Image (cartoon, helix red, strand yellow):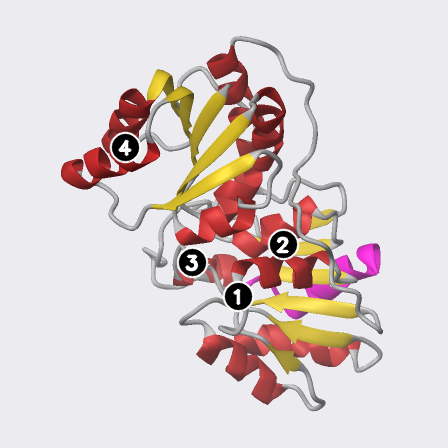
Amino acid sequence: MKVVIELPTWLGDTVMATEALTHICKAADEVVLVGSAVATQAIQNFPKVREVFVDTKKYRPLSTLALAKKIGKADLALSFRSHIFSKLLVQLVGKRGFWYDKKGLSGHQVQMYHQFAESAFGQKFPFGSLKLHYPPTNYPRPTIGINPGATYGDAKRWYPKYFAQVIEELGPKYEYIIFGGPGEEAIAKAIEERVSFPIKNLAGKTTIPQLISHIAGLHAFLTNDSGPMHVAAAYDVPTIALFGPTDATKTSPFSQKARIVRIEMACAPCMRRTCPLKHHECMKELTPQLVLQKFKEII
C-alpha cells in the first residue's frame, strides 16, 4: 500500500505527529512525504519513506494541481492539515483521502493526531510515544541546551537576561549550547554576552537533522514553547518548558521528564503573538528563581 502523507507545517506539530506517523509507516508498504522544508527534514528518515516533496507554494490551486501530478496516485492520502488545498491534494492523489479535522477529537495534540490516524485507517492502534530517528550527539560533559526563540511570536519568548541569570546560577560545571533558528541570532547573542564564562552559540547554524541530534544528547533543556521543545520530548530529555500566552494542556512537551513553568493569570492563555494588554506579565513573572527551583527536580 502506497501512502502519501502531508505533514503539519511547523516542526513542533510534526514532532507531535510522530506517534501517529509511526503507526502509519508500519501499516504502509511505501510512504511519500509532502510538506515544508522544516517538517520533511525532521521525518525524511522514517522507515518506508521513498520520496519527499517539499511544498513551497501553499494555498495556491494551480500549484496544488501541479504538485499532485508530480506525486502521482496512491492507495491512501492523509493530510495533517485542514486547509482547503490540503483537502484538494489528498483528493487528487489518493484513492482514499483524509484530512485533519479537530471535530470529534480530544486530549493533547499527540492524542488527537493518534485518533486522526485511527479514523483514517479504520482501526485501533496501540498508543505509543513520540519518535525521531536521528542519533543523539555524544557530549563529553553534561550539557544544557538553551532555546530562547519561538517561531509563533514574541509573546512566547522569555527574556535574554533571565536565561543568562539561570546559566550564571547553574555555573560552569555544565557546558551550555544556545539554539535558535534563522532570525533568532540576536536573541542568542544577547544571552551569550550576559554570561561571564564561554558558552556555545549555535543559533542559525544548524540544519534540522543537526538540531535534532544536538538536542537528543543533552543533559537538560531550557526552552520556550517551541518546536525544539517537542524534539526534546521525543528523546525524553529532562526539560523545563516556559509557558505564557499558549495553552499547555494541548501542546505541552509529551514526556514524563518535562516540567512546565507558568503563571496563573486571568488573561492567559491568550494565544496571541504579542501581548494584547502590553504588559507581558505572563512571562515577566516567570522569574529565574522559579526556573532554578524546577532545575532541582530534573538535574
* Element under disc 4: helix
Q: Earlier in the sequence, mark 3 or mark 2?
A: 3
**For this view, does 143 lie left or right of residue 76?**
right
The residue beneath circle 4 is: 68
Crowd around label 2: few <14 · some 14–19 · many ≥20 (10 Å):
many
Instruction: Identify the residue shown where x is 21% and y is 38%.
Output: 66
The residue mark sitting in front, 3 or 4, is: 4
The residue mark sitting in front, 3 or 2, is: 3
* Element under disc 1: loop
What is the x, y in percent for residue 121?
51, 13
Instruction: Identify the residue shown where x is 27% and y is 32%.
Output: 68
The residue beneath circle 3 is: 151
Q: Magenta region, mostly helix, strand or loop?
A: helix
**For this view, does 245 lie left or right of residue 57?**
right
Q: Amino acid at mark 2?
A: Ala
The residue mark sitting in front, 1 or 3, is: 3
The residue beneath circle 2 is: 241
- Asked if labels 1 and 2 touch by Cβ distance under 8 angstroms, the answer is no
Q: Earlier in the sequence, mark 1 or mark 4?
A: 4
Residue 288 sits above or below residue 35 on the image: below
Q: CA distance from mark 1 to mark 3?
A: 13 Å
Instruction: Identify the residue shown where x is 58% and y is 9%.
Output: 123
Q: CA distance from mark 3 to mark 4?
A: 29 Å
Q: Earlier in the sequence, mark 1 or mark 3?
A: 3
The residue beneath circle 1 is: 158
Magenta region, residue range: 285-299
